[in-house]
Image: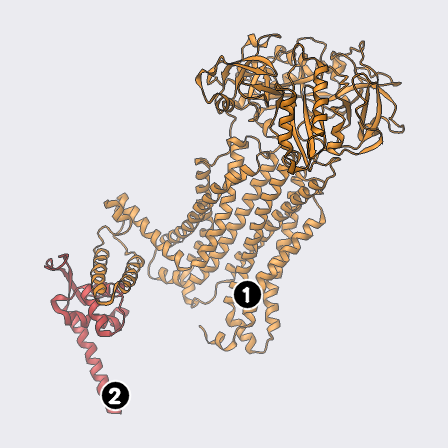
Amino acid sequence: MKGDYLGAFEELVLMAVQALGDAAYSASLQRTLEREARRPVSLGAVHSSLERLEAKGLLSSTIGEPTGGRGGRRRRVFTLTRDGRAALRDVRAVRDRLTKTSRAIS
Amino acid sequence: MKLIDRLIGRGDDDRGREMLEDARELFDERVTSRGRLYAWSRRAWDLAALLARPPRPRAAATGDWTTMISRLAVELRHAWRAAIGRPLVSLTVMTSLALGLGLAMLTFTLVDAILVRPLKFPRSGELLMVATEFRPESGYTYDRFALSAPELIDYAEQNRTVQVAAFQPEGVAFADGVNSPERMPAVRATSGVFRILETPPLLGRTLTAADDRAGAPCAAVLSYGLWKERFAGDSGAVGRRLRVNGEPCEVAGVMPASFAFPTEAARMWLPLAVDPDPNTRGNHGLMAVGRLNPGVRLPQARQDLTAMMTRWVQELPHHKGHSVIIAPLRDELVSRVDQQLLVLAGAAVLVLVTIAANMSSLLLAHGEARRREVAVRGALGAARGSLVRQLLMEGWLLAAGGGIAGGIVAWLSLGPIMRAYPAALPRAAEVQFDLRTVGLGLLMSLLIGTLVSVLPALRLTRAWPDALRAGGRGGSSLGLRTQRVLVVSELAIGVAVSVGALLLVQSFVRLQRVPLGFEPDGVTTAIVGVPGGPGRGPARTRQFFADLETRLRSQPGVIAAGAITPLPFVGAPPPDDFTIEGRPIAKPSEAGFNAGYVLVTPGAFDALRIGLVRGRRLDERDGAEAPPVAVISETLARTYWTNEDPVGRRIRYPEGVKDNDWSAWGPWITIVGIVKDIRAINPAQLPRPAIYVPHAQSPRPFYTGRSMGVVVRADPASEPAASLRRVVRDLNPDASLSTIRTMDVLAGAAVAQPRFMGWIMSIFAGIALLVAALGVYGVVAYGVARRTREIGLRLALGASRTSIAELIGRQTLGMTVAGLALGLTAAAGLAWWMRSLLFEVRPFAIDAYAGVCVILAAAITLATVLPARRATRVDPLTALRTE
């Protein structure tokens, strides 16, 4: 099953959720991803990834308190689940190992 | 609100709402950071993504109807995504469906309004038309002819199954005391006509038994249109004084707008006194309408009247060769178009079938391409039913789109078509686009949607795991075979409809080239009448038309002018019996001599350019005091003077109108010339024998000649219509004038029906051929796409490009031959069936068939060459590498 593996974009989304902490909601994630990846990121892609990751059990979401700012809307705030953190860790571990391997070769 | 939310798939869809809000939030930021243009374009993308979001599966049905509707909405959205996912196919399918359904709805509207709907009279199914057929042994040949008064009275009084009443169309001069007299079509009718038709008047009364007496005061029942036009719909119009043919008349009543009898042309109804003299059986001038008595069926009534006629035939010599015609009124009114409309309806259905077949084959081809997708869905546990439903939904969606567009096409084109062909169809005023049409259109769309998607759906979902195993490459040969069968039938229908259309167009062209025997171009016509009555005897009438001719001729720009009754293309010359000097007078049981009686002033021959064959034409010398003369038509000369020269021979008419009344004779009339035959009724009808009698002598008092068709040949720039109007007014302010029309317009109206048929059938044929060519293209292109690997392999192994083109071409050749063979056979059948609509074109005219073959061959070649070229350009390496 594809769900056992993380897609590249999904990985970015997971990392962004981790990075943003309490402020990880869809719009801010889009903004962050677009800024850091230095390419246009579509809102639709962000949403569908979030939905998929939540379905895989790597993210969980809660409806946050209304924000004080403009509009004052209630937002769905995402946090990493234990599985999510584990998945990120696994990915990083794989990367680290691969990096070491490549250094050893060169 | 909640339901709408659920329908568009939002409702409890928090994610959708979040996306909307996110889009707004990001938009505000982008406006400040990157500018408005950028922000808008990004927002548009975000919203597009929101709309294109795949619908999420919902919880299983709970039986709640809103849930069912929302599930339906989900399926619809799936279908929508599928349709916009292949825009070219969807657009092709919907456009062709729109055309096909549009034409079908249009034709249906015509057929429904004209042939199917009951006439607008109470219990109109019981209404009948009664007439007499004259078989050749009677000396005449008419499949429908008017009744004589004694005949009608006998029918009415002696039968036990039907009510019968007499009427008689008549042009009258109508004056309301304000405007100058105008000639218009009216109908003389007995009170029985209104009793039979049962339509109550809108205002006042209809005609009553008191109006049927000879010498009863004139009472006019106005049509709704005339009342609106002349009395501005004033409810006080009843009782107003009028002048009809110069005589005082009173408005008795007004009929409702829906009342049209016998046709929409009639503008008013006037009393008719039927002369009860039993010795006028030979004077056939009355038309008859009837109604079945309660509980009686048509065959009984027919038997009843036929029994009477059989008795007359035995007892009364006059009725030799007569039989009674009794038929539903509606059938008689529409009899001149029923077959044409059925041909059109048949063509519409055939074209629709072609389009449906084409759509089916297109979807089938695409279905093959989707085989893998469907197989995967099946393997993942989608129920077969839900997949079939999904595909059906796609078919319905396309069909509904085509149906709606088709409805708009039909709705928009109905008006212009009816305006372009006013003379082509009876009951034209009743033709309108309505709910029945829309309903039928919807039904047809649904049916087509089902038909075209069921085949691909069943094929796709049958044995799908195999499809997955086959790696999804290529469709089965079965799919291709089905597709080919569909294309062959498309070709066959296209050929049949095109041959039919071409035959009709040829007929119309021939019809237009028929030598009429006179020249209608440049002639202006009107019907001019002078009132009769005391002090306005025949002498004054003759003088009026003689003066009219002289004055008209002196108008600037006028080349020739004259008067003729009946006016060509407007009426048929009434057949009249005469005797020939030196030949025995025909006994009543024998066929005598008869010919159409035409009253003319001398200038009419020049105005119409009727050619002289021998002798002389009529001229000014042939006045009231001069010896009586006449000119006859070629056909008449041939009929009764086969081996002699008729010029110089004499004929005469009986004075009275009673049967066997040979006691009083009119003067001997010398035949002074023979003129060319003219096709006076319409170009398709062979000329009947005609005799031209000078108006100044008018030997038959029966034909008063008070109203005449005036013909003026003039330079159109000289405004002959204005001269005509002015001269008539100056000569006699009481003279009435009908609408002034050019002879071209009358001639056009005379061929309006064949022109209409030719046009509509050509449109049908064009669509059918186009669709058939598209079908061929679809199959070939799909075949090429499917066989790309094979072609690549062949090329790699050394096959030449020509042989590849041949390979593709051979595929079409089989289909074309089969389609042509089937189509030509069907075309012959169609042509035979509609042979009565053809004019001087044999149903098996080889050139029409050959022409269609050539057109089709060209279309098919084009449809094959395009994909075949693509096949020869296949790069073997690429082709083999692609999986």
Q: Quadrant of residue B598?
A: top right
Asked if B620 appears above or below B485 in the picture, the reply is above
Name the element at disc 2. Answer: helix
Picture disc at residue B769: none
Picture disc at residue B867: 1
Q: Which chain is rendered orange in the image?
A: B
Chain for mark 1? B
Q: Residue at x 28, y 55 (%)?
A: B57
x and y percentages locating residue A97 in the rendered image: 21, 84
The quadrant of the rendering that contains the C terminus of chain B is bottom left
* Residue type, numbered disc 2: Ser
Q: Is residue B326 visible?
A: no
x and y percentages locating residue B722 in the rendered image: 62, 31
Kindly identify which residue carries mark 2.
A102
Q: Residue at x 66, y 56 (%)?
A: B854
Name the element at disc 1. Answer: helix
Query: Quick one: label 2, few (<14), some, or many (20+) residues within 10 Å?
Result: few
